[in-house]
Image (cartoon, rainbow, N blue to C red):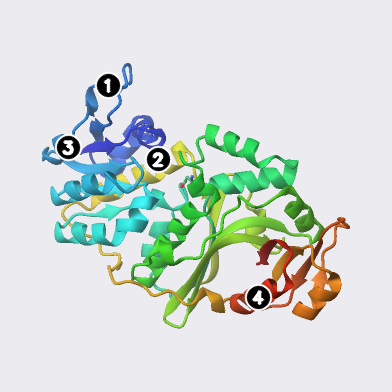
Amino acid sequence: MKAAIMGYGTIGSGVAKVLDTNKEVLAERLGEPLELKYILDLRDFPGDPHEDCFVKDYKKIANDKEVKIVVETMGGVEPAFTFVKAMLEAGKSVTTSNKALVADKGAELMQIAETNNVNFVFEAAVGGGIPIIRTLTACLTGDVIEEMAAICNGTTNYMLTNMEQYGSDYVEILAEAQELGYAEKDPTADVEGHDSCRKIAILTSLVSGKNVDFNDIPTEGISKISSTDFKYAKAMGRSIKLIAHSKMIGKTYSCRVAPFLVKPDNMLYHVSGVMNAVSVKGNMLGESMYYGAGAGALPTASAVVGDMVFLGRNLDKHIKIGWSEEKLELANANEEKYRYFVRTSALQSNIENEFDEVEYANLDLDEEVGFITKEMTEAEFNERKAALGGIISVIRLY
Ligand code: HSE
């Protein structure tokens, strides 16, 4: 079975490595050898073991009837979308690790795959090495998924863990995460929560069967989290985690990405470093949780190669997963209810006037006080917060 890789960066070269290392076992599992025929990349890689495979024009792959499986590991929406669409229309099945592409164009590409009787799969797009996509689209199809909570960005979890454990400086730890190959080229996508937002949009699309527009999801990242926030968190016996959350409300879902203060009795509290975890609640299943390496070349490449075997086993047969292009109108996030931890320079008497009952989480700092509100809607909290003023930071409690 002949395959091609488009994009020979961290993940693409990882895919080649997995294909080489596990060559024999892959041939056994597929029933025939899985061979790399082309690698599309504009750069040259002299001395690479696959030196002879490199091409610079995607049409060379699209026009080669022998190629049945194409891997897209270029990242970004364009030109990835144009290339993937061309491959599907040329009758090739595609696997991608590109969450930006899947979140933006996934439903459309799925439709194109169905029209051309091929498959479009993307196990590596969420949770890297955690098989969460196939879990949701195959194993848990007997359930209505009522809630998902995910730590699905390895970079930010690595950064938060280091900030918590070693009091590390934000900038220094970001550079380290980039060096380790976890962070995106542009770290904004990681630290501002956009990457997690796209991932929870994909997961919510899959469990709802409709298309979630990631732009509709309220998203906050970790760039404003400071070492003082961690001191407060410690005083409250909690940790700070960037959580991508999705909860069924009636016939739709309410989604949010934000840093949350998490207690030790929640399993997400214990997910440290680059690891990812997705907690899933089903109406029959109850809760189950999936944990593992969420980023890095080989865990992600492993998921891509698993997809390649799946594609090879299902040639000439489109496997429906029920993701339509119809838009899912998300529930109003302003109606979500939380307790909020607030740092403010306001006077204690004003805090109690605005918020009635509060719990203080005081670090005895000179110019501020920290307190936790009772549970209220976002809308109500925002009103009271504006009336109080002097806000330094706010983190929701999970
Ligand atoms: N930058 C992403 C992360 C890569 O840190 O999780 C995996 O999607």
- Identify the element where label 2 is drawn: helix
**Nearer-N-terminus badge (3/1):** 1
Decide if ligand 1 comes within 8 Å of the CB at mark 3.
no
Residue 310 locus on image (x, y percent): 29, 50
Report, in whole angstroms, how far the alpha carbon at label 4 lies from the one at label 1: 59 Å
Select label 3 or label 4 by which is in front.
Answer: 4
Give the class, few, some or many, for how many residues have Cα within 10 Å of label 4's Cα (few <14, many ≥20).
Answer: many
Asked whether 141 or 84 is in front, the reply is 84
The residue where tag 3 is placed is 61
Residue at the spot x=57%, y=76% of the render? Answer: 336
> What amino acid is labelled 3 in the image?
Ile
The residue where tag 4 is placed is 381
- Give the quadrant of the N terminus: top left
Residue at the spot x=25%, y=57% of the render? Answer: 109
- Identify the element where label 1 is drawn: helix
Q: Does residue 53 appear left or right of residue 89 in this picture?
A: right
Marks 3/2 in contact by CB < 8 Å: the verdict is no
Marks 3/4 in contact by CB < 8 Å: the verdict is no
Decide if ligand 1 comes within 8 Å of the CB at mark 1.
no
- Identify the element where label 4 is drawn: helix
The residue where tag 2 is placed is 301
The residue where tag 1 is placed is 51
**Nearer-N-terminus badge (3/2):** 3
Residue 307 locus on image (x, y percent): 33, 48
Q: Give the residue at the far top of this rendering.
A: 47
Using the image, determine if residue 61 lies above or below residue 361. above
Give the class, few, some or many, for how many residues have Cα within 10 Å of label 3's Cα (few <14, many ≥20).
Answer: many
Residue 24 locus on image (x, y percent): 32, 33
Marks 4/2 in contact by CB < 8 Å: the verdict is no
> What amino acid is labelled 1 in the image?
Glu
**Nearer-N-terminus badge (4/1):** 1
